[in-house]
Each structure stands twice: as structure tokens, then as C-alpha cells.
């Protein structure tokens, strides 16, 4: 049976009303998802990473004699996490310190020699002054014929001898002064050698550079290690970061330094404050962990979101989501 015109109009009006209602309900949602009204949010997914420090013996080739911590243990800054046998390096320190002691004694001897040389010069100057006065008197007396020519010649010879002795001793005093300078340079060299020996010996001890957790122990007690071999890896859990990827089409919507809200499925309902600190300057394909080809070939930009993590709830490898407030188009 055909519907009456009145009923047709009623049905058509109902359909139009439903369409209008759907449009009013879905349009804001679409605008919010697309960030067109300036209040949208872009959600990025990724994994938590930690700032890690890989510790190894710098110039030491020796046997590990102390390795007190295991993976997963928490250590404070400055705590010794590994130590190698440093007996050879301790001997080098002893030799360097002995050399420094020798240089210090030589310096003391040089100071004494310089002091003696200066006193000799003072005595020579006094002797020269005396001989000069004696020569002057003999010359005056010779003019008055009170002394013989031989006496005057003796006075002149004594003056010249005192003058030569003074010149010689002044040269010896200058040499003594140079010896003091050489001894001081020897002390500085010996001090630097001893300091270097102590530094090299210090390389036999590995200390935690910050408060953190040991994530990897790459060596074992008693193992012989060579310089540069990784021994301990420590992660800073106070300040972690989220590695995520931003679609090329959303690049203009994110801003460096903007505040980010981070959530993790492990702690539902809890939010962590973060900051967008890095956006890669080159695009890359979506990581291969994405299974579908359509998503794998999408160009994305790697981003880094720094997160304060004082409670250490966020750990490396944990999946997390970051909500970024989009900039208006």
C-alpha cells in the first residue's frame, strides 16, 4: 500500500532531522581530531627511553677485582660500581712521587747554593770597596812620596784581583739563580708526572656519574678487560624521554618546547608532564615494526619528549602515549 503524502513528509522530515543532528554531533569531533579549531589534540605513541651512560676503563688493562652491583640495582652518584687491579698503577704513582721528592731536595740544595753565592758576592763587594780605598790612599801618599812605587803597584794589583773575584762570583751567583729556576721547573714537571700517575690509577675505579639503575653488566668479576671495554651501563630514571614518531602531515602542528601530557597503560588515569624537546630535521619511513605496507611507507619524523620521572614509575621499554595540543591551522 502506498504511503499517504502526509506520512511521506513526516518520514522525510524525520530523516532530515536525524542527518542534521548527526552533523551537529560529529562535526566538532572531526574538527577536534583534525585540530582545525585550535583546541585539538594529537596523540603520539612510543616507548620510554632513559639517558644511559656506558662505563668502561679508559686506559687500564687489568683484571676486575670488584664488581659489587647486579643488573636492576639502584646506585647513588659517586658510588664505586667496578674496580680493576691497580697495583701496577700504584707503583707508578710511588715512582712519580719519589721523583718529586728528589726534585724538591734538589730545589732546596739550589736555594742554599744561591744563598751562599749571594753572600760571597756581598763579601767580594766589601773586599773590592776596601781595596779601592786602599789604592786611593796609596796614590795620594805616592804623590807626596810617602810610599814606594812597589807599594802602589801592590795596591793596584790587590784592587784588580778583588775586581776579578767579584766578577767571577757574580757569574757563579747568576748560575746558582738559573739552577734554582731549573729546579723549580723540575718540581713542576715531577708534580705533573705524579698527577698524571694518580689520574691513570684513578681510571682503575669506575664510579656512578649520577643516581640511576644498572641496566646492563657487560663484564664479570675476575675478567681481564682492555681499555674502552664496556663494563657497566647506568640509566638515569629521574629524567626519561619518550621516543615517538610524528606524521609528515602533522609536522606543522607541533612546536618545540610545548608542554605534553604523557600517559602509560601501566598506570591508568595517571598523567606525567613532558616537553617536546626534539624533532628530527629529516623524514624517515615508519619503523619496520609496523606490519602493514601502507603504514610502513608513510614518512614520519622522530620526536623526543623529555619527561620528569621522580617516582621512577616510567621505565625503559614501557609503551606510552603523548597528547600534544595542536596549533591552529
Image (tube, grey):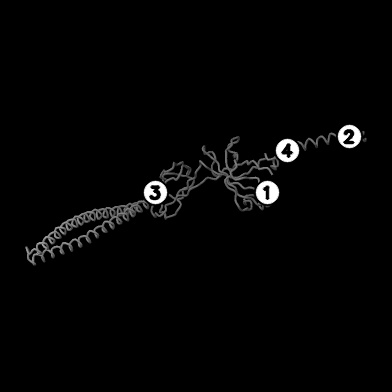
Q: Is residue 317 above or below residue 172?
A: above
Query: CB of mark 4 within 8 Å of CB of mark 2?
Result: no
Element type where label 2 sits in the image: helix
Q: Position of residue 210 (x, y in %)?
A: 46, 44
Q: Residue at x 45, y 45 (%)?
A: 209
Q: Position of residue 308 (x, y in %)?
A: 54, 40
Separation (CA) of disc 4 from disc 1: 20 Å
Q: Quadrant of the N terminus?
A: top right
Task: Decide which of 163, 25 is in the foreground and name it.
Answer: 163
Q: Which residue is mark 2?
A: 9
> In this rendering, which labeled residue sits more in front, label 2 or label 1?
1
Separation (CA) of disc 3 from disc 4: 62 Å
Element type where label 1 sits in the image: helix
> In this rendering, which labeled residue sits more in front, label 4 or label 2?
4
Separation (CA) of disc 4 from disc 2: 29 Å
Q: Residue at x 64, y 42 (%)?
A: 43
Q: Residue furthest front?
A: 144
Query: Tag 2: Cα neighbours inside 10 Å, few (<14), some, or many (≥20)?
Result: few
Rendered image: mark on residue 249? 1
Q: Position of residue 182 (x, y in %)?
A: 28, 58
**Label 2 or label 3, whichever comes before in sequence order:** 2
Q: Which residue is mark 3?
A: 205
Task: Decide which of 107, 64 is in the foreground and name it.
Answer: 107
Rendered image: mark on residue 28? 4
Q: Residue at x 72, y 40 (%)?
A: 31
Amino acid at each position: 500500500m502506498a504511503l499517504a503524502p502526509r506520512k511521506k513528509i513526516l518520514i522525510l522530515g524525520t530523516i532530515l532531522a536525524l542527518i542534521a543532528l548527526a552533523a551537529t554531533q560529529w562535526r566538532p569531533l572531526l574538527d577536534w581530531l583534525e585540530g582545525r579549531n585550535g583546541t585539538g589534540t594529537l596523540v603520539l605513541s612510543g616507548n620510554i627511553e632513559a639517558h644511559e651512560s656506558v662505563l668502561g676503563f679508559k686506559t687500564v688493562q687489568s683484571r676486575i677485582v670488584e664488581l659489587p652491583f647486579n643488573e636492576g640495582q639502584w646506585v647513588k652518584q659517586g658510588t664505586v660500581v667496578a674496580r680493576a687491579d691497580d697495583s701496577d698503577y700504584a707503583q707508578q704513582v710511588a715512582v712519580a712521587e719519589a721523583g718529586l721528592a728528589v726534585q724538591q731536595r734538589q730545589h732546596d740544595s739550589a736555594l742554599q747554593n744561591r744563598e751562599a753565592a749571594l753572600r760571597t758576592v756581598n763579601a767580594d763587594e766589601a773586599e773590592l770597596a776596601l781595596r779601592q780605598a786602599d789604592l786611593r790612599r796609596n796614590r795620594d801618599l805616592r804623590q807626596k812620596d810617602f810610599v814606594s812605587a812597589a807599594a802602589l803597584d801592590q795596591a793596584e794589583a790587590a784592587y784588580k784581583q778583588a775586581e776579578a773575584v767579584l766578577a767571577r762570583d757574580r757569574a757563579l751567583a747568576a748560575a746558582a739563580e738559573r739552577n734554582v729556576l731549573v729546579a723549580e721547573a723540575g718540581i713542576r714537571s715531577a708534580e705533573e708526572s705524579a698527577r698524571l700517575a694518580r689520574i691513570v690509577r684513578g681510571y682503575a675505579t669506575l664510579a656512578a656519574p649520577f643516581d640511576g639503575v644498572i641496566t646492563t653488566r657487560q663484564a664479570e668479576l675476575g675478567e681481564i678487560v682492555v681499555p674502552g671495554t664496556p663494563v657497566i651501563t647506568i640509566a638515569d630514571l629521574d629524567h626519561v624521554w619518550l621516543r615517538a614518531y610524528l606524521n609528515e602531515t602533522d609536522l606543522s602542528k607541533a612546536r618545540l618546547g610545548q608542554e605534553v601530557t604523557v600517559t602509560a597503560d601501566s598506570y591508568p588515569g595517571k598523567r606525567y608532564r613532558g616537553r617536546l624537546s626534539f624533532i628530527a630535521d629529516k623524514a624517515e619511513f615508519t619503523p619496520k615494526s609496523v606490519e602493514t605496507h601502507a603504514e610502513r611507507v608513510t614518512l614520519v619524523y622522530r620526536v623526543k619528549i623529555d619527561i620528569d620521572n621522580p617516582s621512577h614509575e616510567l621505565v625503559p621499554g614501557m609503551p606510552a602515549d603523548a597528547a600534544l595540543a595542536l596549533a591552529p591551522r
